[in-house]
Image: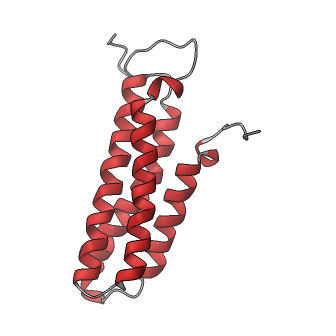
Amino acid sequence: MSKQIRTHRDLEVYKKAFDASMEIFRLSKSFPKEETYSLTDQIRRSSRSVSANLAEAWRKRRYEGSFISKLSDAEGEAAETQVWLEYAVACEYLDRKIALALYNKYDEILNTIVGMINYSEKWILPGKPNKSATGNKR
């Protein structure tokens, strides 16, 4: 029997995204100081945004449009993180095998997010109006 999902922290995709961002944080500590306000900052921000946007999406399940919008933001941030991983390898700041493992984690995260978007009706709160957050009917 599967555990009931009560908060965003119960979502497997949230747990994966949070863990991956913490791994990126630890690894990026060894990036050169001259990258502090560029690659290091960018990869940390995008990786953290994935789990943050998932948390926001979870709280916006009353409104399908808002839910999908936040999931789309999470999807974009996950893809951006993959790009920064590629840069970290190209700049020789990150071992290719380590980066590939993280890149693959983000592929799993992306697949789950896309599935949530494609089947959003399964995630929306029952009995609630299907309006946008501004109150406009779709």
Up the image or down, 87 lies above or below 80; here it is below
Percent coordinates x, y for residue 30 in the rendering = 40, 88
Seen at 57% across and 55% down, the residue is: 15
Seen at 23% across and 85% down, the residue is: 91
Q: Is residue 28 visible?
A: no
Quadrant for residue 132, please give it: top left
Left or right for 125, reference 107: right
The image quadrant where one finds the C terminus is top left
Q: Nearer the viewer, residue 113 or 18?
A: 113
Left or right for 72, reference 101: left
Number of labels in the image equals 0
Quadrant for residue 117, please give it: top left
Percent coordinates x, y for residue 75 in the rendering = 35, 47
Percent coordinates x, y for residue 64 in the rendering = 42, 23
The image quadrant where one finds the N terminus is top right
Seen at 34% across and 10% down, the residue is: 137
Quadrant for residue 24, please give it: bottom left
Up the image or down, 114 lies above or below 136; here it is below
Percent coordinates x, y for residue 102 in the rendering = 43, 69
Q: Is residue 82 visible?
A: yes
Up the image or down, 34 lies above or below 62; here it is below
Seen at 38% across and 29% down, the residue is: 66
Up the image or down, 61 lies above or below 31; here it is above
